[in-house]
Image (cartoon, grey):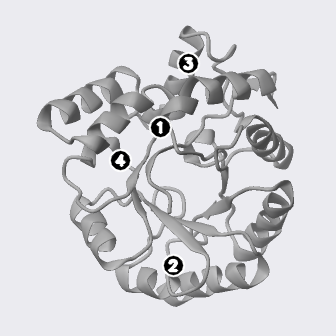
Amino acid sequence: MYQGTIVPLITPLDGGAVAEKGVQRLIESVRGEVTGLMPTLSSGEGWALSEQQWLDMVSYTIRHANGLPVLSGIQLPDTKSVIERSLVAEDLGVSAVVVTTPFGADVSQDAILAHYRELRAAVQVPIFLYNEQALSGNHIAVETLLRICQLPGIAGIKESSGDAALTSRIAAELTIPVFEGWENLLSEVTGVAGLIGPLANLEPGLCNAMLAEPSADRQAAINAACEKFGVFKDDWYRWVKQELRSRGVIDSDEVVAT
């Protein structure tokens, strides 16, 4: 069972290519404080990566994981593309794939359930659900989550709805681990297994302290760090990269060209 702080890794770039040394140094900088590595999700600009960039980032993360589980993000718009990419991730040796719903505001809950059923039937690797709306344009209703989680091999949920009450309800009703995706809501949610948030690239120890002994003071420190490092901005990954570069963890704060 996953728990604690899982880091959604940013993607270090150099001239458009994934910088392996940057990936290695980033992992080493957080290794002692995190329980898993999640490359190529939103903080890793997963929706914008080329196929080669995605492949390199996942491969380098696995190469330098040194025992930490690697849960690879897959942010593609339709079920067929997700299955194809998941099979590649499986061949690379990931511990799980992290998958959103199909893209589109008109995607029904039945279509969402069918999406995960098809994925489950096609791949052997466990599946981590990513419940968000900013990219996909839709969300997974609680009733649909309950049905999806009856499928075998559902490893957890990154719950990024931004609704603390909803997240707490999901955590109470499901037996799989639920992770808060918003650092500023940690003091409001109950029953979660941990955090998956971009601040973990910079301050995983602070995230762990909040999970271990939540308090108003620790939440205030989390919020202040998020403000300082641009985590609440729309292009948060850019600002996180700038701070990592200033610390000497990565050599460039280049973002994916879109």
Foreground: disc 4 or disc 2: 4
Alpha carbon separation for disc pair 3 and 1:
12 Å
Alpha carbon separation for disc pair 4 and 1:
9 Å
List x then y, in percent, for residue 71: 64, 54
Disc assigned to residue 106 = 2
Residue at 68 percent across and 16 percent down: it is 252
Alpha carbon separation for disc pair 1 and 2:
29 Å
In terms of sequence position, does the residue under pointer 2 or pointer 3 come before the other? 2
SS type, badge 1: helix
List x then y, in percent, for residue 95: 69, 58
Left or right of 188, for residue 16: right
Label 1 with label 2: CB-CB less than 8 Å: no
Label 2, residues with CA under 10 Å away: few <14, some 14-19, many ≥20: few
SS type, badge 2: loop
Residue wearing tag 3 = 244
Label 3 with label 4: CB-CB less than 8 Å: no
| Residue 19 visible in the snapshot | no
Residue wearing tag 1 = 198
Q: Amino acid at mark 3?
A: Leu
Residue wearing tag 4 = 182
Left or right of 257, for residue 3: left
Alpha carbon separation for disc pair 2 and 3:
38 Å
SS type, badge 4: loop
Q: Amino acid at mark 2?
A: Asp
Res 231 quadrant in image:
top left
Q: Amino acid at mark 1?
A: Pro
Alpha carbon separation for disc pair 3 and 4:
20 Å
In terms of sequence position, does the residue under pointer 3 or pointer 1 come before the other? 1
